[in-house]
């Protein structure tokens, strides 16, 4: 079958790209290996750089219905419970970036994207379609093979197929790098939450080798929690097994935490865990008529909460250059990666450092960090101007 523009992967990156390209007048076909388009039942933080783009895509109404806007981001010491800093996310933040800091349920975000995609007649959505092979041909086409034995011939392919991207193997033989950290996450009904939730605040408890993030989602009906710790049992040889980062380690690591954190941890579901991976930045994302997007291109540790935000920025950038270059795929892909690689590489590196600062065991470094946090100000976010104030369109 002939498919002019194929997107592989129906996650946040692939869906946003499909929507942006379709709104710009390009016909796109999106394939997803899962039997339906969906996301896991946990929360996601979206900073102004991503919300701004979703807004431009006409999603502000849909987002408005599903979003929670924390008034503050509060940092606390995970062991002593000591207050470290409060970052004010209210009026001055919104004025500075033109958008709010937003938290929402991943499923709600994907549904909003899916609904918007369904209103576009130039988007074909195909779930239950797993890519097994991709090859550039000399006549500027790409042949894509599927597990069901079918084959598509495409003029352009965007690999938005996530951390374990098949598409990326065309460009690199690098493997995802496991950080030895693992996350447990999920949302529980707000009525079951034992700690007080003020102003819809986002709370981040930090300490040596672990942290806990908490915030309300879905109009405040659910409370999202993410507990992350460094496993002592981790060994690269067992990275792909379930032998490390186990629920008993979760309890052991958080056993020294303050009472409120321990009570929160006791409410976690334990059947699924997410090992934390990233990769080193890649110098080139494009081969022939195939390019990468989102986690396939630039997987990062989640400490800046930017992985999905960057996938959304990718979608905007790729579309902008497709329009600017009048649909010339070679020129658009080249311009896209020239703009996106330096920025995402920087964020991948800073995310690692951010995690090290949160998780440091070094008492001197901790003292220094806490002093910076204790600055008599609530606009610490200005340090992230480079991240949140991006040019769009
Ligand atoms: C604990 C944790 C917390 C996070 N918190 C945040 C946050 O607060 N804010 C933020 O911005 N980011 C956050 N992130 C990062 C964010 O989740 C990812 O960066 C983002 O989801 C990547 O989206 P994507 O579309 O690129 O990839 P994915 O969401 O992985 O989507 C890829 C899709 O491709 C499909 N696929 C894969 N292979 C194939 C194939 N062969 N054929 C067909 N389909 C295929 C998959 O099924 C999947 O649906 C967090 C990550 C973690 C682990």
Image: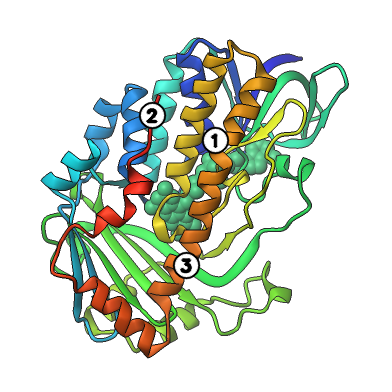
Residue plotted at (50% across, 65% down):
352
* Residue 174, image quadrant: bottom right
Colour pattern of the rendering: rainbow
Task: Please report contact status of discs 2 and 1: CB closer than 8 Å, yes or no.
Answer: no
Rounded to the nearest angstrom, the CA distance separating label 2 from label 1 is 12 Å
Q: In this view, does 54 lie to the left or right of 131?
A: left
Q: Is mark 1 on a helix, strand or loop?
A: helix
Q: In this view, does 94 lie to the left or right of 325?
A: left
**Ligand 1 within 8 A of label 1's CB?**
no
Query: Circle 1 sits on which residue?
Result: 339
Seen from the viewer's position, the closer of residues 170 and 250 is 170
Q: In this view, does 47 lie above or below 77?
A: above
Query: Closer to us: mark 1 or mark 3?
Result: 1
Q: In this view, does 58 lie above or below 170?
A: above
Q: Is residue 146 above or below residue 183?
A: above
| Within-10-Å neighbours for mark 1: few <14, some 14–19, many 20+ | few
Residue plotted at (66% across, 49% down):
282
Q: Tell me residue 304's x, y (percent).
A: 40, 57
Q: Tell me residue 261's x, y (percent).
A: 27, 77
Could you tell me which quadrant the N terminus lies in?
Answer: top right
Mark toward the start of the polypeptide (2 vs 3) = 3
Query: Circle 3 sits on which residue?
Result: 353
Task: Please report contact status of discs 1 and 3: CB closer than 8 Å, yes or no.
Answer: no
Q: Is mark 2 on a helix, strand or loop?
A: loop
Residue plotted at (49% across, 10% down):
121
Mark toward the start of the polypeptide (1 vs 3) = 1
Q: Tell me residue 199's x, y (percent).
A: 11, 56
| Within-10-Å neighbours for mark 3: few <14, some 14–19, many 20+ | some
Residue 392, disc: 2
Rounded to the nearest angstrom, the CA distance separating label 1 from label 3 is 23 Å
């Amino acid at each position: 079958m002939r498919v002019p523009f194929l997107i592989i992967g129906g996650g946040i990156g692939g869906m946003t790209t499909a929507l942006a390209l379709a709104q710009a007048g390009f016909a796109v076909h999106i394939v997803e290996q899962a039997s339906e388009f969906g996301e896991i039942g946990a929360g996601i933080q979206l900073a102004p750089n991503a919300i701004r783009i979703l807004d431009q895509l006409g999603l502000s109404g849909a987002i408005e219905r599903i979003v929670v806007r924390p008034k503050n981001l509060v940092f606390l010491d995970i062991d002593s419970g000591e207050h470290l800093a409060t970052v004010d996310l209210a009026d001055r933040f919104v004025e500075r970036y033109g958008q709010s800091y937003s938290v929402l349920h991943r499923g709600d975000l994907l549904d909003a994207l899916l609904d918007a995609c369904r209103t576009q007649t130039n988007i074909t959505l195909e779930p239950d379609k797993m890519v097994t092979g991709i090859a550039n041909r000399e006549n500027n086409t790409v042949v894509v093979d599927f597990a069901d034995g079918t084959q598509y011939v495409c003029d352009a392919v965007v690999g938005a197929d996530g951390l374990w991207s098949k598409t990326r193997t065309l460009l690199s033989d690098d493997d995802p790098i496991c950080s030895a950290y693992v996350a447990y996450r999920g949302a529980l009904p707000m009525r079951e939450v034992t700690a007080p939730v003020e102003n819809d605040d986002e709370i981040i408890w930090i300490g040596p080798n672990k942290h806990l993030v908490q915030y309300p989602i879905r109009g405040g009906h659910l409370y999202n929690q993410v507990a992350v710790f460094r496993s002592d049992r981790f060994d690269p040889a067992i990275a792909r097994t379930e032998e490390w980062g186990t629920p008993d380690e979760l309890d052991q690591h958080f056993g020294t935490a303050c009472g409120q954190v321990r009570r929160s941890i006791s409410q976690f579901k334990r059947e699924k865990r997410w090992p934390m991976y990233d990769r080193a930045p890649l110098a080139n994302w494009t081969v022939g008529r195939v390019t990468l997007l989102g986690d396939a291109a630039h997987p990062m540790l989640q400490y800046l909460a930017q992985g999905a935000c960057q996938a959304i920025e990718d979608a905007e950038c790729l579309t902008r250059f497709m329009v600017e270059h009048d649909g010339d795929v070679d020129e658009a892909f080249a311009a896209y990666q020239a703009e996106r690689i330096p920025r995402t590489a920087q964020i991948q590196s800073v995310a690692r450092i951010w995690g090290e600062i949160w998780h440091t065991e070094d008492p001197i470094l901790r003292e220094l960090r806490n002093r910076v946090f204790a600055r008599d100000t609530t606009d610490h976010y200005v340090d992230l101007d480079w991240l949140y104030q991006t040019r769009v369109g």
